[in-house]
Amino acid sequence: AMGLEPNMHLTCTNVERKDVIKALQTCKDNDVRNIVALRGDPPHGQEKWEATEGGFECALDLVKFIRREHGDYFCLSVAGYPEGHPDTIVHVGDDETKLSASERTRCRVTDEDGQRKVYVCPDATFKLEMDYLKKKVDAGADAIITQMFFDANTYGAFLKACRKHGINVPVIPGIMLVQAAGGFRKMTAMCKTRVPAAVKESVDAKADNDVALKAYGVDLGVQISHELLAVGAPGLHFYTLNLDKTTLAIAKRVADDRASSRTARDW
């Protein structure tokens, strides 16, 4: 009733070609048609990603293989990185005012042991990221689901960059739920995600109050959802972390708000 669509995530990490073939057949047998084709993260304890012998090198290879073997049966989504892939986000000093206008939309600023540090995917590298994304789309991806972010303007800038690059498939924003301060800090640090000051301050202030932090997570999810839809998002993808109640609470409030808005306009 809420228009929620599950997606099966298929990665190249520790996966041989025969495993992918089996997984795709299982999907067909169970009428699962939505697949997110990903390279995947390095296995736990391994610093750099390495291809499995007899497997795939990257998401682009996976998309090409699925299209070659199964035609248009599956709806394929691929990952997009509004702030740049974490591997491309580097330390560039301590002054974000020296960045270009586009770099400032995606930079991460931290205070590490009292030292201010700025991280960003530089414009030249970001262009290479967009070139690769276009190759995935040209190979047969139907849609893009983005890495998490916490600023709707970051998504808006990425959407414009996609269109400028000739990438015209739907770009669906990925929304990460804020539910625990420790998990939030760990995840944003690992992904080198830009965290707006207001979000950081709110999480820090509620870190020791589980109920208040969860309520804030829902409020933030609703707020970002509305902002994303307002700047042109064709839909919303929630990284649920198995937190179905929180996800459904956000989806219901957004749906109810939009229904109330339509009713008000009809009057």
Image (tube, rainbow, N blue to C red):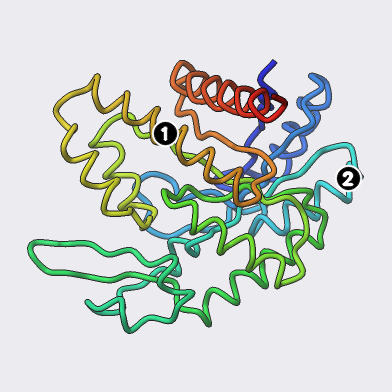
What residue lies at 34% left-to-right and 52% top-to-bottom? 190
Q: Could you tell me the amino acid type at mark 1?
A: Leu
Looking at the rendered image, the quarter that the N terminus falls into is: top right
**Residue lying furthest front in this view?**
267
Q: Nearer the viewer, mark 2 or mark 1?
A: 1
Which residue is located at x 49 percent, y 74 percent? Answer: 102
Residues packed near mark 1 inside 10 Å, few (<14), some (14 to 19) or many (20 plus): many
Residue drawn at the location 54% of the way across and 58% of the way down: 81
Residue occupied by mark 2: 69
Q: Quadrant of the C terminus?
A: top right
Check the image and report above or below for 38 versus 219. below
Residues packed near mark 2 inside 10 Å, few (<14), some (14 to 19) or many (20 plus): few
The x, y position of residue 96, in whole percent, is: 30, 76
Describe residue 38's horizontal placement relative to residue 163 as left or right. Answer: left
Give the left or right position of residue 44, taking residue 3 as reference.
Answer: left
Where residue 255 appears, as percent x and y from the top left, is 60, 24
Residue type, mark 2 in image: Glu
**Dot 1 corresponds to which residue?**
177
Q: Secondary structure at mark 1?
A: loop
Q: Position of residue 22 (x, y in %)?
A: 75, 32
What's the residue at 35%, 31% (across, down)?
217
* On screen, residue 166 above or below 193: below
Question: How many angstroms separate mark 2 from mark 1 (CA)?
Answer: 35 Å
